[in-house]
Image: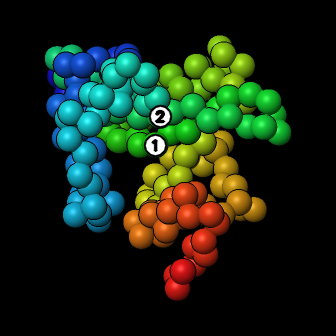
């Protein structure tokens, strides 16, 4: 029996899954041509998922041998306009050998079900513009949000802005 013949089981991530999920995060980074920027460790992921105040959550897709073959890592958002939470999907990944089994759809369906059960109004994520998964997302009726542009503050710019919190409002631009 091939992997594709068995529908994967979906369940929340457990501590024992952390090494496999970390390995798959690194596989995803490699696929996204960013392996050199991925520094996640098992300790970091375990603390984020199972520490005293978890803010990250996850689900895994399991093959017939109950081994993780895919994952979804996510966190809650809050829309002030809608007055309710939503879910931001940080990463969705299915190992190549398990693609075509429905694992990706089932992982997203688990998150969609959580949204519906809890009254959350959205499930959202970002993806690289060249990723062929766009076809999959369109097939489940996901849409791009063309009028919103993501921004990121990191590195030296983040530190400059943080310093302004104690510097009496000092300039935070590149020269300040």
Depth order, front residue of 156/119: 156
Q: Which residue is mark 1?
A: 90
Tell me what residue is drawn at x 27 percent, y 61 percent.
Answer: 37
Q: Which residue is mark 2?
A: 74
In the picture, measured across the screen, residue 16 lies left or right of residue 153, that is: left
**x then y, percent, for residue 116:** 67, 20
Depth order, front residue of 7/21: 21
Tell me what residue is drawn at x 43 percent, y 22 percent.
Answer: 53
Tell me what residue is drawn at x 29 percent, y 50 percent.
Answer: 28
Q: Residues within 10 Å of mark 1 (few under 14, many from 20)?
A: some
Instruction: Using the rendered image of the protein, determine whether residue 113 is visible from the camera's viewpoint.
Output: yes
Give above or below for 37 relative to 135.
below
Marks 1/2: CA distance?
Answer: 5 Å
Q: Residues within 10 Å of mark 2 (few under 14, many from 20)?
A: many
Which secondary structure, mark 2?
A: strand
Instruction: Using the rendered image of the protein, determine whether residue 97 is visible from the camera's viewpoint.
Output: no
Verify CB contact (< 8 Å) between mark 1 and mark 2.
yes
User: Which image quadrant: the N terminus?
Assistant: top left
**x then y, percent, for residue 70:** 31, 33
């Amino acid at each position: 029996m091939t992997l594709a013949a068995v529908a994967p089981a979906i369940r929340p991530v457990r501590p024992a899954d952390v090494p496999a999920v970390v390995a798959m995060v690194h596989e995803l980074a490699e696929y996204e041509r960013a392996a050199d920027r991925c520094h996640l460790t098992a300790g970091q992921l375990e603390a984020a998922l199972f520490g005293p105040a978890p803010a990250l959550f996850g689900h895994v897709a399991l093959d017939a041998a109950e081994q993780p073959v895919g994952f979804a890592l996510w966190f809650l958002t809050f829309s002030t306009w809608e007055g309710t939470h939503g879910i931001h999907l940080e990463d969705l990944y299915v190992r190549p050998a398990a693609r075509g089994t429905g694992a990706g759809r089932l992982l997203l369906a688990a998150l969609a079900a959580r949204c519906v059960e809890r009254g959350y109004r959205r499930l959202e994520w970002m993806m690289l513009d060249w990723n062929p998964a766009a076809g999959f997302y369109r097939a489940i009726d996901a849409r791009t949000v063309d009028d919103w542009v993501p921004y990121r503050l990191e590195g030296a710019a983040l530190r400059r802005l943080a310093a302004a919190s104690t510097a009496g409002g000092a300039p935070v631009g590149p020269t300040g």
